[in-house]
Protein backbone atom coordinates (compact mmCIF):
# COMPACT_ATOMS: atom_id res chain seq x y z
CA UNK A 1 0.00 0.00 0.00
CA UNK A 2 1.13 3.54 -0.65
CA UNK A 3 1.65 5.34 2.65
CA UNK A 4 3.66 8.23 1.16
CA UNK A 5 0.93 9.08 -1.36
CA UNK A 6 -1.96 7.79 0.76
CA UNK A 7 -4.41 10.57 -0.02
CA UNK A 8 -3.91 10.50 -3.79
CA UNK A 9 -3.47 6.73 -4.21
CA UNK A 10 -5.99 5.42 -1.70
CA UNK A 11 -8.45 8.03 -0.42
CA UNK A 12 -9.07 9.85 -3.73
CA UNK A 13 -9.09 6.65 -5.79
CA UNK A 14 -11.08 4.23 -3.61
CA UNK A 15 -12.89 6.66 -1.29
CA UNK A 16 -11.89 4.83 1.89
CA UNK A 17 -9.93 5.86 4.95
CA UNK A 18 -8.41 4.41 8.10
CA UNK A 19 -10.19 5.23 11.35
CA UNK A 20 -8.39 5.43 14.73
CA UNK A 21 -4.78 4.80 13.70
CA UNK A 22 -3.00 4.40 17.08
CA UNK A 23 -1.78 7.70 18.52
CA UNK A 24 1.99 7.95 18.68
CA UNK A 25 2.47 5.41 15.87
CA UNK A 26 3.84 7.09 12.74
CA UNK A 27 1.73 6.72 9.59
CA UNK A 28 4.32 4.80 7.59
CA UNK A 29 4.41 1.31 6.15
CA UNK A 30 4.55 -1.23 8.98
CA UNK A 31 7.86 -2.66 7.72
CA UNK A 32 9.48 0.72 8.46
CA UNK A 33 8.22 0.97 12.05
CA UNK A 34 11.37 0.53 14.10
CA UNK A 35 9.84 -0.03 17.53
CA UNK A 36 8.35 -3.51 17.97
CA UNK A 37 5.93 -2.23 20.62
CA UNK A 38 4.50 0.35 18.20
CA UNK A 39 4.10 -2.36 15.57
CA UNK A 40 2.33 -4.64 18.06
CA UNK A 41 0.05 -1.76 19.07
CA UNK A 42 -0.86 -1.23 15.41
CA UNK A 43 -1.52 -4.93 14.77
CA UNK A 44 -3.60 -5.20 17.94
CA UNK A 45 -5.65 -2.15 16.96
CA UNK A 46 -6.61 -3.73 13.64
CA UNK A 47 -7.18 -7.21 15.11
CA UNK A 48 -9.52 -5.90 17.82
CA UNK A 49 -11.35 -3.52 15.49
CA UNK A 50 -10.18 -0.38 17.26
CA UNK A 51 -8.58 0.72 13.97
CA UNK A 52 -10.39 -0.14 10.76
CA UNK A 53 -11.06 0.84 7.15
CA UNK A 54 -14.26 2.74 6.43
CA UNK A 55 -15.78 3.93 3.15
CA UNK A 56 -16.26 7.67 2.89
CA UNK A 57 -19.75 9.11 3.16
CA UNK A 58 -21.17 11.03 0.21
CA UNK A 59 -20.37 14.30 1.96
CA UNK A 60 -16.75 13.18 2.59
CA UNK A 61 -16.40 12.04 -1.04
CA UNK A 62 -17.57 15.41 -2.25
CA UNK A 63 -15.09 17.16 0.07
CA UNK A 64 -12.23 14.94 -1.16
CA UNK A 65 -13.11 15.74 -4.78
CA UNK A 66 -13.25 19.49 -4.03
CA UNK A 67 -9.86 19.39 -2.29
CA UNK A 68 -8.30 17.38 -5.14
CA UNK A 69 -9.66 19.83 -7.72
CA UNK A 70 -8.39 22.82 -5.71
CA UNK A 71 -4.91 21.27 -5.44
CA UNK A 72 -4.85 20.58 -9.16
CA UNK A 73 -5.92 24.13 -10.03
CA UNK A 74 -3.30 25.56 -7.65
CA UNK A 75 -0.63 23.40 -9.27
CA UNK A 76 0.13 21.52 -6.06
CA UNK A 77 1.20 17.92 -6.56
CA UNK A 78 -0.76 15.40 -4.52
CA UNK A 79 1.84 12.72 -5.10
CA UNK A 80 5.46 12.78 -4.06
CA UNK A 81 7.66 12.56 -7.16
CA UNK A 82 9.58 9.37 -7.72
CA UNK A 83 13.35 9.38 -8.22
CA UNK A 84 14.59 9.13 -11.79
CA UNK A 85 15.92 5.71 -12.73
CA UNK A 86 19.70 5.42 -12.85
CA UNK A 87 19.52 3.93 -16.35
CA UNK A 88 17.08 6.52 -17.74
CA UNK A 89 17.92 7.51 -21.29
CA UNK A 90 20.14 4.49 -21.90
CA UNK A 91 19.36 2.08 -24.69
CA UNK A 92 18.19 -1.29 -23.42
Image (cartoon, rainbow, N blue to C red):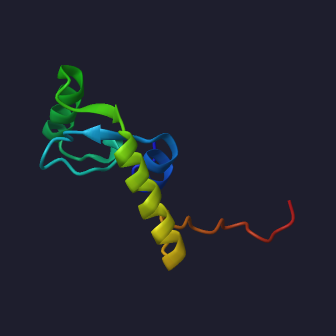
Which quadrant: the C terminus?
Answer: bottom right
Residue placed at 30% from the left, 39% from the top?
18
Q: Is residue 85 left or right of residue 21?
A: right
Say above or below: 24 vs 80. above
Please state the total of marks drawn on the protein image: 0
Compared to residue 62, the image places residue 57 above or below, namely above
Q: Residue furthest right?
A: 91
Q: Is residue 34 left or right of residue 14?
A: left
Residue at the spot x=47%, y=64% of the render? 78
Place of residue 55 in the rendered image (x, y in percent of width and height, measured from the top left): 37, 34
| Position of residue 34 in the picture relative to residue 31 (left or right) | left
Q: Tell me the quadrant of the picture where the N terminus can be found.
A: top left
Q: In the image, what residue occupies the spot 53% across and 75% down?
A: 73
The residue closer to the viewer here, 61 or 11, is 61
Q: Residue at x 49, y 78 (%)?
A: 74
In the image, 26 versus 21, the foreground residue is 21
Residue 33, x across and y down, in percent: 26, 46
Q: Quadrant of residue 63?
A: bottom left
Is residue 4 placed above or below 69 in the rendered structure? above
User: Closer to the camera, 15 or 10?
Assistant: 15
- Give coordinates of residue 85: x percent, y percent: 66, 65
Q: Is residue 52 above or below residue 69?
A: above
Residue most extreme to the top: 48
> Does 46 sit left or right of 89 as displayed?
left
| Residue 48: image location, x then y, percent | 17, 21
Amino acid sequence: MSYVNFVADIVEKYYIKIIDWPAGTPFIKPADIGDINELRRLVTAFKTGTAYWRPLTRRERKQVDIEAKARKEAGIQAKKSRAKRSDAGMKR
